[in-house]
Amino acid sequence: MAKKSAMGQFDEIMDAAAKFVEQQKGVWDHTAWTDFLDNISKTGVEVNAEVKAYLGTLLESMKKYYAAASATDGLTATMKAIAENTVSFLNKTKGSWDHAGWETYLKDMQKKGAELSDETVKYLGSVLEISKELYNLPTFASKAAAKTASKK
């Protein structure tokens, strides 16, 4: 079996996090958390203390969005869109953006059906910021930089 690229793993982690929060309806116990971590480790990511901390914060940020938007139709699709748009945005911006970039991210999320109240915008900001931290971990960042350099 071919080893996944770092960005492929990052994409998979983001998708798994969004699915987990949606499937758990924003509520989980320690067993569900450890099962989630086991599934992440199966992607080939070393789930060390630092990665666990970032994943925990990511899930909590997504959980807050989920709770705030739980009455929204199509929440399952929106959770998937959060994962996909966040990965796409981080890849496009290399984890660095300005206010115009943030506005573009929000417009893209709105097109995908995300509810954009003051509260949910704040939570999407949290999801994006913690995702950036995870994206910039050496596990992902150094492999992505090497891949970009090899294309030149």
Image (cartoon, helix red, strand yellow):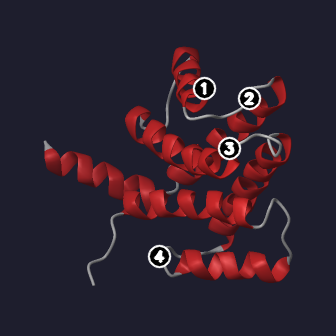
Name the residue beneath numbered marker 1.
106
**What is the secondary structure assignment of the residue under circle 1?**
helix
Q: Is residue 107 above or below residue 128?
A: above
Question: Which amino acid type is shown beneath numbered disc 4?
Answer: Thr
Question: Which amino acid type is shown beneath numbered disc 3?
Answer: Val
Name the residue beneath numbered marker 4.
43
The residue under the point 84% across, 79% down is 30
First-in-chain label (4 vs 1): 4
Q: CA distance from mark 2 to mark 4?
A: 30 Å
Q: CA distance from mark 1 to mark 2?
A: 8 Å
Q: Nearer the viewer, mark 3 or mark 1?
A: 1
Q: Residue furthest front?
A: 73
The residue under the point 40% across, 41% down is 91
- Disc 2 crowd rating (10 Å Cα; few below 14, some 14-19, many 20+) is some
Question: Which amino acid type is shown beneath numbered disc 1?
Answer: Leu
Name the residue beneath numbered marker 2.
121
In the shown orientation, is residue 27 left or right of residue 74?
A: right
First-in-chain label (4 vs 3): 4
Q: Which mark is residue 127?
A: 3
Q: Are marks 1 and 2 in contact (CB under 8 Å)?
A: yes
Q: Are marks 2 and 3 in contact (CB under 8 Å)?
A: no
Q: Nearer the viewer, mark 2 or mark 3?
A: 2
Q: CA distance from mark 4 to mark 1?
A: 29 Å
Q: Are marks 3 and 1 in contact (CB under 8 Å)?
A: no
Q: Is residue 45 above or below residue 151?
A: below
Question: Which amino acid type is shown beneath numbered disc 2?
Answer: Val
First-in-chain label (1 vs 2): 1
The residue under the point 63% across, 66% down is 51
- Disc 4 crowd rating (10 Å Cα; few below 14, some 14-19, many 20+) is some
In the shown orientation, is residue 133 left or right of residue 57?
A: left
